[in-house]
Amino acid sequence: MAGPTFQALPGFRDFSPGECAVRNYLFETWRSVARRFGFVEYETPILEDTGLYLKKSGGELSSQLFRFEDQGGRDVTLRPEVTASLARLAAQHQRDFPKPLKWFEIGQCFRYEKPQKGRGREFHQFNVDILGEAGPAADAELISLAIETMLAFGFVAGDFVVRVSDRAAWITFAEAHGIPEDRIPDFLNVVDKVEREKPDALEEKLKGFGLTTSQVKGFIADPANASANFNAIRADLDARGLVEFLELDLSIVRGLAYYTGIVFEIFDAKKSMRAVAGGGRYDTLVSTISDGAVDLPATGFAMGDYVIRNLIEETTHTAMQLEVWKQRRNASCEIYVVVADETRQNDARRIVTDLRRAGVATDFSLVPAKVGKQFQRAEQSMARFALVVGSEYPQLKLKVLGSRTEETGDATHLIDWITQRLQEPDGPLLA
């Protein structure tokens, strides 16, 4: 039989209920950690003026834009990343808020690149930023939040590493080796690919800057080239008990041209996939976006949903944590009301309404069905309990679907009874 006529476009995804559950797990974890750190949520449009991304993005990004002319003749782009929109928003409204701004967004982004493992043409991005604070303490706070996010997903020491560098150190290196200022962005793009580029190709590209591979790799390998800002961040994370996750890696420079100082990326310990997250300091972007009207130092990072999901699913202990969460959240209700006596249909509907109004997720069969069929639906819904309304009403039976145990209660005390039972760890997922 022929398949469906229409399918999702290459690099785009449908989110079935199971896929939505995984996405919600990521979103809820991201929000929870950001709020623990005192960050507040904002949101920007998916569609922006193309000029916003051309102004100072650089690198490959400008060639990956989903760009088109709308019906009003405007040159517009589906956002490829969130930071430029944040800079626009902050420049416009920063006077309304005390500094520093500690903001985060979970937004959908679009890039026209080759779909592969860990990369699609649409993705969701967790964007976390501190604006209005120029010192390394803000960078340390961001890196700390990134580490705590990984820990919240269940990762432990040895699973991942935060590799930190400083673009300012590379700019000093470039100036010392006579690279003209207007060519430094191109040089940094070469450095950004040092680990991925073929040796002959790398040597040829560096020759164009009057450099050799040994000079560049020698700079990367020397810990003495760590900047003062890196050392301050290291001391800060040491005080937090997080320094074991930190590593100096001067090969990290990040691909976007707006970064100005400290940059970092999170990798799995085996470095078996792309960076899980990355970011850094971008002190001039707000000024650039606002044409100099607002000068606001900033630092931030982003984590995309593709790579972190792959890493979670490929790491045993984090995959187990995800499965437990999915089981709990995949349940369509907490209580499934089973009508064992058809003359009690109206009583059952009143019970359903009362439970729902009390905040208890409750479901039932919309049409009369055999008791066995109703219990089957209760199991399929992954409810913790089946509440049986029968001929003994107002006496009710509450069956624990995980352990097959039951107890009896009175409908006149329904809400207190059920609320108390839901707080006790006897559901099927905890048995």
Image (spheres, rainbow, N blue to C red):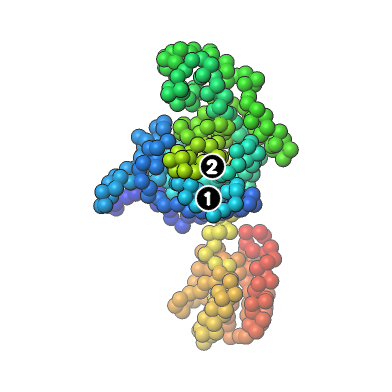
Name which residue type carries label 1: Gln
The residue at the point 71 percent across, 33 percent down is 235
Residue contact between numbered discs 1 and 2, judged by CB atoms under 8 Å: yes
Can residue 341 be seen? Answer: no
Name which residue type carries label 2: Leu
Residue ID for mark 2: 296
Along the line of sight, which residue is nearer the eye, 401 or 39? 39
Q: Secondary structure at mark 1?
A: helix
The residue at the point 51 percent across, 85 percent down is 346
Locate the C terminus by quadrant.
Answer: bottom right
Question: Looking at the picture, how far across and down is residue 52, in whole percent?
Answer: 39, 42
Question: Looking at the picture, how far across and down is residue 355, in whole percent?
Answer: 58, 76
Query: How dense is the environment of label 2, judged by Cα within 10 Å: few (below 14), some, or many (20 and up)?
Result: many
Q: Earlier in the sequence, mark 1 or mark 2?
A: 1
How far apart in space, not on screen, are marks 1 and 2 (Cα)? 9 Å
Residue 53 occupies quadrant: top left
- Name, please, the residue furthest toward the bottom: 343
Query: How dense is the environment of label 1, judged by Cα within 10 Å: few (below 14), some, or many (20 and up)?
Result: some
Residue ID for mark 1: 94
Question: Looking at the picture, how far across and down is residue 367, in whole percent?
Answer: 44, 77
Residue 80 occupies quadrant: top left
Q: Which mark is residue 365?
A: none
